[in-house]
Image (cartoon, rainbow, N blue to C red):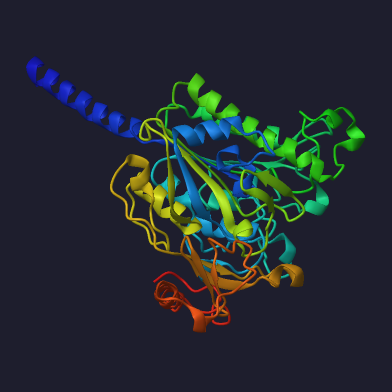
Amino acid sequence: MSLRGYFLVLILFSFIISCRSDKNDNKPNIILIMADDMGYECLGCYGSTSYRTPVLDKLASEGIQFNQCISQPLCTPSRVKIMTGMYNYRNYDYFGHLNNGSYTFGNLLKDAGYATCIVGKWQLNGLAYKDEIPYWNDNNRPVDFGFDEYALWQLTRGRNEGERFADPLIEQNGKLLDTNIDDYGPDIFANYLLDFIDRNQKVPFFVYFPMVLVHEPFVPTPDSDDWADPDLRYKNDTSYFRDMVSYTDKIVGKIVNKLELLDIDENTLIIFTGDNGTHPTVYSNTVKGIVQGGKGNTIDAGVHVPLIAYWPDKIQEGFEFNGLIEFSDFFPTLADIVKVQRDSDGKSFYPLLTGASYKSRETVFVHYDPRWGKRVNQYRNQFVQTNEYKLYQDGKFYNISKDILEKAPLNPDSLDEEQHITWLMLAKELKKHPGLSESRGTSVE
């Protein structure tokens, strides 16, 4: 080969490598943070006056604040739905369990070439069903579901063996951490996340952070005055809930600061949400009045959660979105980001993140069959809703824009024309899905 030919080959090779590098560099980093038991009323940007959340409020003002995000009413149903993009009647079989045949957004992002990590609350090995689920103690399941690394509470050890806050019981990449009363679980998870970002800043990464905050027990944080007394670190009192919300905001701030320090914040998408409504023992003041937490219940306070998307490179001017979003929508959104086609029950909101044309959902659908004790199962139901109206499988029909607590079902014989048209539309939508008695983990067609 001539010298000229050699240089031409070298230039061509360099061009190919450059193209590959540019393609890789253009993949956004993704951090999905999900608070545990935090309804929309807990953030200042949604009108809360009980709690201080300056970091999240700022992200909302500079990103997209989704005002109508509907989750499942309880933790595992929400976690299975958000991770797989499927309605619960397809793949939800036990409380505290993720079906082995599931394909998660962890698998999706790993298959797309991302470095992946999960930190926080797992509770998906089926620890309450050890006689029925043979792999309940398999500590490799997070890896099987697409996560290269993990630091998790309630992986193969139940809550009865160790709590999540002071002196937490945490399994990290196959090993049980040695902790003491001065260690605080949320800090351990956050610090591992920050270290993962440090180690993977040169490659696209995906971090899923299902937080342990702000779930009960409501206990002091390291920023609470009572933390100074080790004997009070598991004193359960709703008065500490305010501190727990503030600490959640503080941790998000640490993540944002790390991204800015590494100069990778512009091309990092941060999504923040909650898995279900706030605990019913918590009453929060808002600009529209007092909101009692509705966790476990299908009313608005049980399923209306915060959703914030912050991505400086794409969302250059913050705005509020009042259209409906449901938890099946996260999976196809992430699939769109990495340009992968994959079946799900959701509707991608990726166009909203990029400023492209987007047609809002008319309805959201919730199939809720928690399979977790009489007290929880009393709210078992299905519903379809718009922003204004909600129809349950049992026939109850509400104007939720005026009757948010669902105290006065509308009389089917007294509907005006608009209400009747809406009722017909919602009834038609409900018929697309198997009823509660018919469903037991069917697969996506």
In percent of width and height, residue 260 lies at 49, 22
In percent of width and height, residue 408 lies at 62, 72
Can you say whether 18 is above or below 216 in the image?
Answer: above
Q: Viewed as shown, does residue 411 lie left or right of 188?
A: left
Can you say whether 85 is above or below 428 in the image?
Answer: above
Nearer to me, 436 or 128: 436
Q: Quadrant of residue 224?
A: top right
Can you say whether 148 is above or below 405 in the image?
Answer: above
Instruction: Specify the quadrant that holds the N terminus.
Output: top left
Task: Give the residue displayed 61% in from the left and 40% down from the top.
Answer: 43
Nearer to me, 113 or 86: 86
Nearer to me, 137 or 170: 170
Name the residue furthest right. Answer: 231
Instruction: Specify the quadrant that holds the C terminus.
Output: bottom left
Name the residue furthest bottom. Answer: 413
Can you say whether 193 is above or below 275 in the image?
Answer: above
